[in-house]
Amino acid sequence: MTGAGRQPSRLVKARPAPFGADPAGARLERILRSPNYADGVFVNPVAAHQGPSREMFKSLPATLRKEARVTRKPARPVPVHPTTLADLAVPPASGLRLTWMGHSTVLAEIGGRRVLFDPVWGDRCSPFSFVGPKRVHPAPVPLGSLTGLDVVVISHDHYDHLDMPTIAQLVHSDVVFAVPLGVGAHLEHWGVPAARLHELDWNESTGIAGLRLTATPARHFCGRGLRGRQQTLWASWAVTDGTHRIFHSGDTGYFPGFGDIGAEHGPFDATMIQVGAYSEFWPDIHMTPAEGMQAHTDLSGGTPHGVMLPIHWGTFNLAQHAWADPAEGTVAASRTTGAKIATPRVGAPFEPADPQRDDWWWREVAVVPAGGWPVHPERPPGTDHPAAPAAPAALAAPAAPADTADTAGDYEAARPE
């Protein structure tokens, strides 16, 4: 792809606001000087076949298969933690607390500061309000109730990570933004002042409110319009207050660079790792749960350290796998490696320093797979996690799939017969 220096056409200038804006001026000049930019595009640390658009037609049969469509949505309303705001009103005892708000959105409280990763409060991850993947559960709290935010971190510009309606609300606060190189063009187009933007290339760091944030490499791609120009960078992020260290993967395929990131910025007390929306049709740009666990292990130098929080699942239907598969796969991978994981319900704050109880809550609401739920091995000796609860008796037998869908509280859910 070439033509990076071309000015946008009149048609591009007239495109819908959610498509964002192309980098121009000094921002574009900085992009052209980036060591991660070549031949008119940003490039991955390891070559990646950029899906899923190129593989869309190949994946259609799997996407449209009747029995698979039913399992890709929860069968019942997803449980959302009811007391998130009350819990957040009490400071974390350890100085580090994470709250998974669904998909890749995580509120991190670290060193007395609040960092919000990839905030998406919109009903659809789409440029349009009437079409596109729809939430299967509500956000656990209103965005306006999250007071005291110090920084919003964006991993890349895809709609399920960079949501214009959410940014439009945050514009009215005084929060600053840490974003990968080029992404600032979208935010400025939506009204974020340039003074509130910290725009980083890979391996660049910035200081915000006593925190050090570093944009680290990832293996993915970018684009919001009909014609992706690869003009904005994608990134994972390392954040530290000098005492605690956390890592957010953004979207990424597996690559060996996680070990380098861990050696430079770890060890991490907690990692937030993408484990959902993977597919055989785009294996290079999203990780499976097993690959996500390998990334978590690599970040610790080969031996699992800290707590892994699986993200990028549970909120939007973006791939062919069953809705609960990312969670089940993460549990299985943790049993194999002995890694500590946290599987909180949406909106339930937890402190990585505390023992993490097993809560396989998704089994309460998912379509039960044929043959029933897998039996995971016991945890290795010496772990501090209580035994996992048994699946509810009502879910012990597989449910018969149906070719119908319904909404629960206006959120998508499959209804087994």
Image: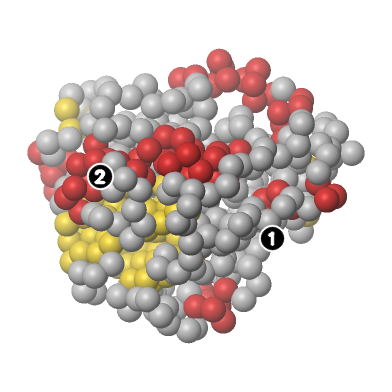
Location of residue 356 with respect to 186 vertically, above or below: below
Q: Which residue is mark 1?
A: 79
Q: Is residue 241 left or right of residue 414?
A: left
Residue 296: in sight, yes or no?
yes
Helix, strand or loop status at disc 1: loop
Location of residue 288 with respect to 127 vertically, above or below: above
- Residue extending furthest toward the top: 58
Q: Which mark is residue 282?
A: none
- Residue extending furthest toward the right: 417
Q: Which mark is residue 301?
A: 2
Location of residue 304 with respect to 58 vertically, above or below: below
Residue 188: in sight, yes or no?
no
Tell me where residue 337 appears, x and y as whole percent: 43, 42
Q: Is residue 271 left or right of residue 358?
A: left
Q: Going 56% across and 67% down the picture, which residue do you hit?
A: 348
Q: Going 17% across and 57% down the picture, which residue do you hit?
A: 205
Inspect the image, locate mark 2, and give the three-letter code of the amino acid beneath it.
Gly
- Residue extending furthest toward the bottom: 90
Whole-number angstrom distance, CA of label 2 to CA of label 1: 35 Å
Front residue of this view, candidates 362 and 125: 362
Q: Quadrant of residue 260?
A: top left
Q: Going 40% across and 68% down the picture, which residue do you hit?
A: 353
Inspect the image, locate mark 1, and give the three-letter code of the amino acid beneath it.
Pro
- Earlier sequence position, callout 2 versus callout 1: 1
Q: Quadrant of residue 397?
A: top right
Which of the image's four quarters has the C terminus? top right
Which of the image's four quarters has the N terminus? top left
Q: Is residue 264 left or right of residue 293?
A: left
